[in-house]
């Protein structure tokens, strides 16, 4: 599984919007007790233009 930061999130958003999709999507993020994957993912998604 590739790290979220390595995924082309901005490009994916652009492609979806160009195709007329403005709905919701889903990412599955594995977590381990004591890590910060969810908060890091939220920050990366916001930086890529997702709300």
Image: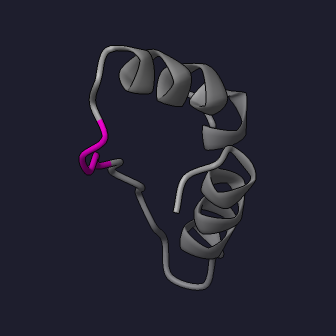
12 left or right, relative to 22: right
Residue 19 image-quadrant placement = top left
Count of numbered marks: 0
Residue 1 in view = no
Above/below status of 34 relative to 46: below
**Image location (x, y in percent) of residue 41:** 60, 59
Question: Which residue is rendered at x = 28% and y = 46% of the image?
Answer: 25
**Image location (x, y in percent) of residue 14:** 54, 23
In magenta segment, residue 24: yes
**Image location (x, y in percent) of residue 9:** 59, 32
Principal SS element in the magenta part?
Answer: loop
Residue 48 image-quadrant placement = top right
Question: Which residue is rendered at x = 46% and y = 15% of the image?
Answer: 15
Above/below status of 20 relative to 32: above
Pick whichever, 38 or 47, lies toward us.
47
**Image location (x, y in percent) of residue 13:** 50, 30
Name the image colouring.
one colour
Above/below status of 16 relative to 40: above
Residue 41 in view = yes
30 left or right, relative to 38: left
Question: Which residue is rendered at x = 70% and y = 65% of the image?
Answer: 43
- Residue range of the region highlighted in magenta in the rendering: 22-26
Pick whichever, 12 or 4, lies toward us.
12
Q: Residue furthest bottom?
A: 34
19 left or right, relative to 47: left
In magenta segment, residue 21: no
Residue 8 image-quadrant placement = top right
Question: Which residue is rendered at x = 27% and y = 30% of the image?
Answer: 21
């Amino acid at each position: 599984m590739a790290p979220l930061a390595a995924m082309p999130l901005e490009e994916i958003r652009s492609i979806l919007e160009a195709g007329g999709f403005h709905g919701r999507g889903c990412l599955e993020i594995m977590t381990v007790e004591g890590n910060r994957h969810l908060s890091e993912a939220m920050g990366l998604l916001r930086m890529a233009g997702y709300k």
